[in-house]
Amino acid sequence: MASPDILIIDDDPMVGELSRDLLTDAGYSVTLVQDSLEAIPTIKAQMPRLIVTDIMMPGMNGMDICKLVKSDPALKHIKIIIVSGKSYKIEKQRALQFGADFFLQKPYNVETFSSTVKSILSGDAAALEPAPAECPAPEVIHEEEAAQASDLYAGQLRVTIWGARGLPAVIPNSASRYGRQTSCVSVETKEHLFIFDAGTGIVELGREIAAKKRYYKDIWICLTHFHLDHILGLGMFAPLHDPNFSVHLIGANDPERSLKEVAQSSLYSSFALTKQPPKAKIDIYEILEDNYELFPGVKLSSMYANHPTSTMIYSLETLGKKIVYAPDSEIWGDATAFQDYDERLGIFARGSDLFIHGTMYTDCDYEAHKHEGHSGLSTVVDFAAEKGQVKELVLFHTSADYSDEDLDKMLADAKARALAKGFALSCRLPAEREAILLEGTQPV
């Protein structure tokens, strides 16, 4: 038996037989499969030129069939038309993501159905990408306008805390003076914006950028790792949906998930919080433990943190200032010949103007959570002053279970310890949207 031109997969006898009759009358050889579980064996046995499949079917749905066919090197050349009454834009995007060549909405036009199939087979059909909704053309921002959009002077840096809490098992009902959003810190200069982590705090940052129409030459987003509280807000970051921006996404791959996979699931997946694909220009940089010159005058360094999964710590040096960001890092405080993490981190952070380090637990609570990947208060204070020799310590990523009174006491205890031990160390436990202005050197 010769291979058919077209294989139709549809559990609805009326629709399936109508499609078969229309295409047969147009001169094609057609096979109809009504049991979706027989679809893949039939495809492999008959090797059609084109598959026309419904989405919602018992057994195996059309999206699964499409994904299996397009991911098989022996089958991926077969063209696929998805035909469905599920005409949501997100379903069209999913079909495109899985490799479909066209999406046809039910009920389709019987008079044009055969010609549509012909155009797909001949390669003349328009791309599957759904037409964008009618909207005004994006505002074009010129370089000189972007420079005026920032309220900073050349040489100034503004560090803003947009989220500094851990992710709780249950969302708290109580308000907090310190805020409830998860990890996100921005470092802003007159022309550039650097963001560390994309927890829920990044959503409010994006809203402010959009509201104040602040435009930057580039936005750099550095992810420490892929735990949910550090990536949850990525898809809802407003500049990603504005074509005026260029966004550079930086992070280390993990054996379980690559940076590209995280970007895909956060920005393009139908399970992402956003329902629109990004419009900004996006570059992805998969990094290792190393030193990187992002551009002249800006150095980004990275080292692996003492924390479960592939987790990074970042150091940003620009305009004569050094900012170290280590939200998930367990400082042992008792280094041995077999454990040199404290020493390496001390060298990495030494002399930083701001040392933003995870301090999830009070000393008492840390005893019950040792070797889980997070640090206790006194260990962080002692490390910052003695090994890091930093100017200011920012207590960060505190437990979501702590009340404001607990956090007030943590800060008081940190300051008391630094005073009692004679440390020349400033300690801060920031609230959301708290900004720290640093006066750096003028760029050359």
Image (tube, grey):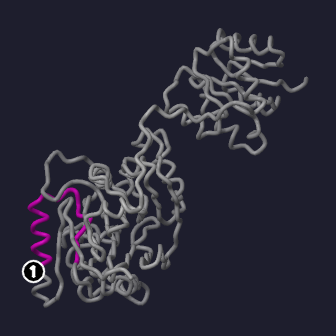
Query: In the image, what residue type sits under mark 1?
Result: Ala
SS of the residue under disc 1: helix
- Magenta part of the protein: which range? 393-415
The quadrant holding residue 59 is top right
Residue at horizontal 73 percent and vertical 19 percent from the top: 115
Q: Position of residue 312 (x, y in %)?
A: 42, 70
Residue 64 located left or right of residue 282: right
The quadrant holding residue 227 is bottom left
Q: Is residue 304 above or below residue 246?
A: below
Residue at horizontal 47 percent and vertical 74 percent from the top: 295
Q: Find out whether residue 409 is within the magenta segment.
A: yes
Q: Which residue is mark 1?
A: 416
Residue 49 located left or right of residue 218: right
Residue at horizontal 47 percent and vertical 67 percent from the top: 310
**In the depicted view, which residue is nearer to us: 116 or 328?**
116
**In the depicted view, which residue is nearer to us: 60 or 63?**
63
User: Which class describes the residues within 10 Å of circle 1: few (<14), some (14-19), or many (20+)?
Assistant: few
The quadrant holding residue 424 is bottom left
Residue 83 located left or right of residue 381: right
Q: Position of residue 36 (x, y in %)?
A: 66, 24
Q: Position of residue 19 (x, y in %)?
A: 70, 14
